[in-house]
């Protein structure tokens, strides 16, 4: 993969990972429009790592609370607010883990990676986001996040196993349905992205180590570094802009974009 394509891949991953448009959908269709080879597992890990570093940097205070919660949970007797927050995040992550395991056992995941499925999912899952944004009352704050919220939003997040559905979009949809404000719904989505991205990266690492390309990082160190750095900066900028404007605008622009994106991909595929 050439340098330009490598940087393009990293930037697209960073820009789309945390907004409700589906990064996996964009990465999947990239080879179609630019006639490049699909990214390797190693580069996939690198660009996700860059995005993960960006969200951990911006939400370092939340991450600090999760670490404190981990310490409280395992080394202290008291049940602190931080340990409760950690438990909520873990509970919300369980459904997508279960969904991944089930679909893997029945070998369904590979069938969901069809470009047509991705395009349709981009369109279909945009409508619940639109309805939740327009109809649901937005009166709750992130401080109101409860165990029932974690389970409900976690179930919504599990739909993100379908490429094109958008992990961020599904989380935000679930949070809006539960009555959270737009800003807080997006905040919840970003916090839940940390264990999800970390978990998916671990799975990719295991897959990489089981192949002949286990020494990928040693052979392609500069490509990995470029991928991490550009993905980090793209994700950092994307999150900052997203949170600056989410208080002022609705999710309608993202819904319109997803519908247009899906139909453009379908039309493009139909022309061949």
Image: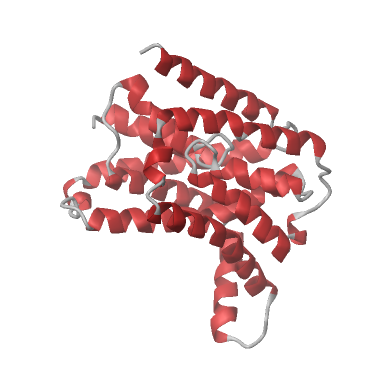
Residue plotted at (49% across, 59% down): 97
Location of residue 81 by image quarter: bottom right
Q: Is residue 227 shown above or below 122? A: below
Residue 130 image offset from top left, x and y in percent: 71, 32
| In the displayed structure image, the side of residue 62 where residue 132 appears, left or right | right
Residue 184 to residue 117: above or below: below
Q: Is residue 204 left or right of residue 89?
A: left
- The residue located at (40%, 37%) in the rendering is 113
Quarter of the picture holding the N terminus:
top left
257 lies above or below 88: above
Q: How many marks?
A: 0
Q: Is residue 245 visible?
A: no
Which quadrant holds residue 258? top right
Residue 213 x, y percent position in the rendering = 18, 50
Q: Nearer the viewer, residue 61 or 113?
A: 113
Is 164 placed left or right of 207 in the picture?
A: right
* In the foreground, 123 or 32: 123
């Amino acid at each position: 993969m050439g340098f330009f394509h490598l940087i393009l891949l990293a930037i697209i991953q960073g820009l789309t990972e945390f907004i409700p448009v589906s990064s996996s959908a964009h990465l999947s269709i990239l080879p179609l429009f630019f006639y490049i080879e699909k990214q390797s597992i190693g580069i996939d890990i690198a660009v996700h790592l860059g995005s993960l570093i960006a969200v951990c940097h911006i939400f370092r205070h939340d991450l600090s609370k999760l670490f404190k919660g981990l310490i409280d949970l395992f080394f202290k007797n008291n049940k602190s607010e931080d340990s409760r927050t950690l438990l909520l995040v873990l509970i919300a992550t369980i459904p997508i883990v279960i969904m991944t395991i089930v679909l893997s056992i029945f070998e369904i995941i590979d069938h969901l990676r069809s470009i047509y499925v991705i395009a349709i999912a981009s369109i279909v899952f945009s409508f619940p986001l639109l309805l939740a944004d327009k109809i649901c009352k937005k009166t709750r704050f992130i401080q109101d996040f409860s165990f029932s919220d974690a389970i409900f939003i976690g179930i919504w997040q599990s739909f993100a196993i379908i490429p094109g559905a958008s992990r961020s979009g599904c989380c935000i949809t679930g949070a809006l349905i539960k009555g959270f404000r737009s800003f807080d719904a997006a905040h919840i989505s970003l916090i839940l992205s940390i264990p999800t991205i970390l978990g998916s990266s671990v799975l990719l690492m295991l897959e990489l180590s089981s192949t002949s390309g286990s020494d990928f990082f040693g052979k392609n160190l500069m490509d990995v570094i470029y991928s991490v750095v550009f993905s980090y900066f793209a994700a950092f900028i994307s999150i900052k802009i997203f949170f600056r404007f989410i208080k002022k605008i609705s999710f309608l622009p993202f819904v319109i974009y997803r519908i247009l994106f899906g139909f453009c991909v379908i039309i493009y595929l139909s022309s061949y």
